[in-house]
Image (spheres, rainbow, N blue to C red):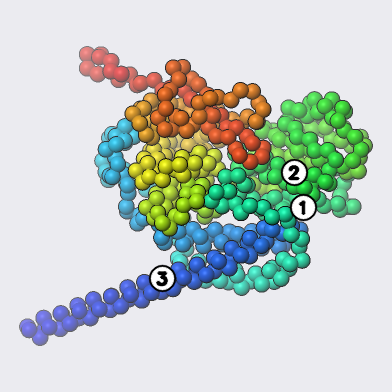
Amino acid sequence: MEFLVSAVASDLIGRFISSLAQNYNNHTCKEDDRRRLERILVRMHSVVEEAERRHITNQGMLLQLKGLIGGFYLGCYMLDKIKFQPPEEESIEDEVSHEIQSFALSACNSAKRFRLADAMRKHTPVAFGSRNTTSLKDTVDGLETKIADMREFVILLGSHPRLPRQPYSTYLYIDTCMFGRHIEKEQVLNFLLCNNPHDSYISILPIIGPPRIGKKTLVQHACQDERVRNCFSHIFFFKEDDLKTGELSLNSKASLGKHLFVIEFIWDVDETAWTKFQSFLQNMAGTGIKVVVISRREGIAKFGTAQPIRVKKLSEEEFWYYFKALAFGSMDPDAHPELASLAMQLATEMNGSFLGASVYGELLRADPNTQFWQRMLLFLREVSQKHLTSSGLHPVDLLDTNIPVDFPRIAFVGAQVQGCLVYDLRVAGPAEGQLPKLTSRDILLGGDFPVEDKFDVLVWRSRIPPYSNYIATLEKRKPRRVVGKRNTIYH
């Protein structure tokens, strides 16, 4: 018996020592991979930064650069995930739930909330870590291969002309620069600056993408390029309704020279008006006409003489890089790991929204306080869960289709518990009438509500061309009437 006990004990000790050794080896390998990743990212960043300072006309090189940029953001995301992302089973709900009882689903216990959060993650289009199952080692190996394949790219890069130096678009400058559209901008510039003698007299480039994705911003930045301004004697900006009156406005402006027309279509194209507009362009005096048409509808592609540019949402890795820069500003995220962990969770709730990143990133940067960031996370999470469970759609998707979003509580600080419906999110130019004085910042930080039941709010003002103003309508939600025993009505 003693021999048997001794053998079992020896076996257990051996397994324990083997387990410790395996864990140590795994930790050592993971640490080595992390250091390899850091070195790779330094090299990739150098190549990307140099490439973004060049005017690349070769389409193959642009595709290579797009892959390199995507790999760089993936590497940065994986590195931050190792440093900041909490284990999946952890949650901050218990830490501050007593402060936001009005947010909670009263019928749900703790286990149900965790199941609801899990369901929400599965239905959220942009969910950090929920779809990205690539291991650290696989990521490092893939990026090393990508770097090795870029040697020819780096050599060819030297043959392309340098551009005027631009401020580096991260941290303090990221909210005043266009982010994540370098490849698309180069494609637009190549279309505008190309003088192919085999092209038709009128060249048309469609740009297609969902609402508030940056299509107009992309075109405006291309049109502000000095080479484009020097190339075209006249640049006109129209909306779809202007096509019917465009001829009258052009007659007084058009003259000899090259012309560029940028036309934005919100809905389907009126083909009669479009045909009339094209006929007018054919009869214009000049040496060549370029037309850029912007639309959220795929059908616009049939009007193009060039391959359409499709502007898509940022990948989850790109969006995290962008949001992190907005939220931390000049702060170093490594020095604030708890805030960085919260920021990763906040990025998940925003579903890749540029507008959401701008609004909430500015608030976070102004108040780098853990409790404040926790409240904002719970505020966004509750709103997301509410709509994902009721409609299967994220609030961002609802606003894009002009479906009202129900906020049970419109402010995440202060004592304001007023619920509101938010809808009709729209864009106004910098000179389009008087803007609302009430801002989203005032509302979210618990400012005084107007006495009116319905009012407009200035959600955000863009700091980059075309300097759009985003406005939404808020409608106070009336208290529910609950009928109890003896027909007593409770408000």
The span from disc 2 to disc 1 (Cα, nearest Å) is 12 Å
Say which amino acid is labelled 1: Asn
Instruction: Say if 231 sits above or below 52 in the image.
Output: above
Q: Quadrant of residue 238?
A: top right
Q: Quadrant of residue 426?
A: top right
As drawn, the label of residue 353 is: none
Q: Which residue carries the number 3 mark?
A: 30
Say which amino acid is labelled 2: Cys
Q: Quadrant of residue 50?
A: bottom right
The span from disc 1 to disc 3 (Cα, nearest Å) is 43 Å
Total labels drawn: 3
Indicate the position of residue 261 as horizontal and vertical percent values. Answer: 79, 38
On-image quarter of the C terminus: top left
Outermost residue to the left: 1
- Return the disc, 1 or 3, that comes first in the chain's sequence: 3
Tell me if 206 is positioned left or right of 437 in this view.
Answer: right
Q: Which residue carries the number 1 mark?
A: 190
Mark 3: few/some/many CA within 10 Å (<14, 14-19, 20+): some
On-image quarter of the N terminus: bottom left
Instruction: Say if 340 sits above or below 261 in the image.
Output: below
